[in-house]
Image (cartoon, rainbow, N blue to C red):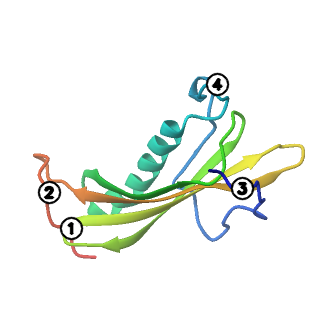
Amino acid sequence: MSEPSVPVSELPHDKQPALRVMPMPADLNPAGDVFGGWVMSMVDIAGAIPAVRRARSRVTTVAVNSFVFKQPVSVGDLVSFYAEVSSIGRTSITVDVEVFAERDPENPVVVKVTEARLTYVALDDKGRKRPLPAG
């Protein structure tokens, strides 16, 4: 269930988005909102970016620890995905992703639409999990 649309004053200025994208009409569900699976796939891509940088190798998604849809996403929204490593294991990297939508260019408003936590595992060149390199 989505929460009432509560605008956020602005996007986080102390962070750079891992990914920014504008959904297209082909990304809509029958209700006219952007399909949740599209949002989930973009979150997975955004979360993998800092995981790959930290692992210095391929990674694979092993868990979606949490995923909360707070607001629907609409065609025309500019959607920003902020991803940050939250914990490191021997072979795994957990990443928090926050998603914001910039809406209505004539009267701009920013709303937080999704937040998620995903875990990735570092892979070697044969696709087997491997230990993360030091720091």
Q: Distance between the residues labelled 2 and 1?
A: 9 Å
Q: Residue at x 89, y 43 (%)?
A: 106
Circle 2: is it few (<14), some (14-19), or many (20+) Cα within 10 Å?
some
Q: How far apart are marks 4 and 2 (CA)?
A: 38 Å
Query: What kind of residue is marked 2?
Result: Lys
Q: Which tag, 3 or 4, sits closer to the chain's start?
A: 4
The nearer-to-camera label among 4 and 2 is 4
* Viewer-side label of 2, 1: 2
Q: What element carries label 1?
A: loop
Query: In this rendering, would 131 be left or right of 89?
Result: left
**Residue located at (64% from left, 37% from top):** 22
Residue 25 - label: 4
Q: Does dot 4 land on a helix, a strand or a loop?
A: helix
Dot 2: element: loop
For the residue marked with disc 1, what is the amino acid?
A: Leu
Q: What type is the residue that disc 4 sits on?
A: Pro
Q: Disc 1 and disc 3: Cα gap in Å?
A: 35 Å
Q: Which of the two labelled residues, at mark 1 and mark 4, occupies the earlier sequence position? A: 4
Residue at 24 percent of width and 72 percent of height = 89
Q: Are marks 2 and 1 in contact (CB under 8 Å)?
A: no
